[in-house]
Amino acid sequence: MAKPRGTCPHCNKALAKGSKQCLDCWYKRVGTTTKKQSLERQTIRQPLTSYDEAYKAWGELIGMSKDRYTGPPDRTGVENVTRICVIPDLHIPHHVPELLSALIARESDRTDLAVMIGDVSDCYSVSRFTQYEKVPFEFEFSELTAALQVISQAFPTVRIVAGNHDKRVSRQIAAHLPNADWVDAVRAMTGGVLDPIYAVTKALPNVEIVKHPIPDTDLTVDWLTVIGDAVFAHPEVYSRVPGAAARKLDEFCHDHGEAMGIDYAALRFLCMGHTHTMSLLPWRSSTTKLMVECGCLCKTAGYMTQPKIGGGRPQRRGYVTLTQYDGRTDLNSVRLHFLDLED
């Protein structure tokens, strides 16, 4: 962490070098308006307007000395041994920065590959569902850019599995334009990029969105990837029964493995996002498998506070790590890290 220098003028907390106020006061926007407006903004978060503000906030949070993106770190691991850190659903800008910074502090120095398992962005501003707060698109894009640059600098290789929220913009464009020609016209003007996450990752050399090829076709899918004997996926499935969603993913890989280019008999580990909960389930004694739901690192959503009761299980904040030797997952190395149970 940066050496404290001075104190916050609003709460007297110690400040990092170059900071004018602490992160808590920055989030509340204390001192930026009248007292009445300041109190209102403690409950209604006012968005940032630029990437510079978002990146500076990250710098204060994790003690980053650089004020600009400096590129990926070198890989320091052992040959043929790959330690993987699975970064679960973030839903930026509704992520919890303190938990993501804790993950980076713990795992960046000993991780060879970070897998972001979908819903990296929320695209809340274009949601067709009830919106419980105002979140401008510019704010979301600034936060997404800053967070992905921080992650890019922390891990030597980052692969992103696309989630349903990551594709909200393209889906909304396709739903509201008259036909595919209109969509193609917009795509041509944006360089082929419609969703924010694709635009941001283009500038990050060690970050890629996965493209799993479908055999005997020109098709690829970005919601699933195979690494060694492991599948990492963001299927759009929920269940109130622990492990049931993971079993559905396993059934999909079993039933559609040949069509999807997945060697089901060789699979030993399946990891899924989307459910926001955590579970670990040994499965199928004849073909030993371990299935995991990897949690989330996002805040409580507005819809969770409503009287309509249903949906999945309560969300758990945490992440998953594992180690592969020559592409074979050491099932004893798989660990669930529960961040919402710790100080």
Image: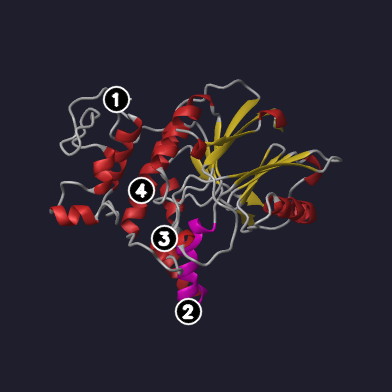
Identify residue type, mark 1.
Answer: Ala
Secondary structure under badge 3? Answer: helix
Read off the residue under disc 2. Answer: 178
Mark before the other along the chain sequence, 1 or 2: 1
Q: Residues within 10 Å of mark 4 (few under 14, many from 20)?
A: many
Q: Which residue is mark 4?
A: 143
Q: Quadrant of residue 23?
A: top left
Of tags 1 and 2, the one toward the viewer is: 1
Q: Percent from the top left, x then y, of residue 95?
A: 42, 47
Pointer 1: what residue?
A: 2
Disc marking residue 115: none
Front: mark 3 or 2: 3
Q: Amino acid at mark 4?
A: Glu
- The foreground one among 194 and 40 is 40
Nearer-N-terminus badge (2/4): 4
User: For the residue marked with disc 2, what is the amino acid?
Assistant: Pro
Separation of marks 1 and 3 at Cα, in angstroms: 33 Å
Residue at (78, 46) in percent of width and height: 264
Identify the magenta region. 164-180
Q: Which mark is residue 124?
A: 3
- Relative horizontal placement of residue 110, taking residue 1 as reference (left or right): right
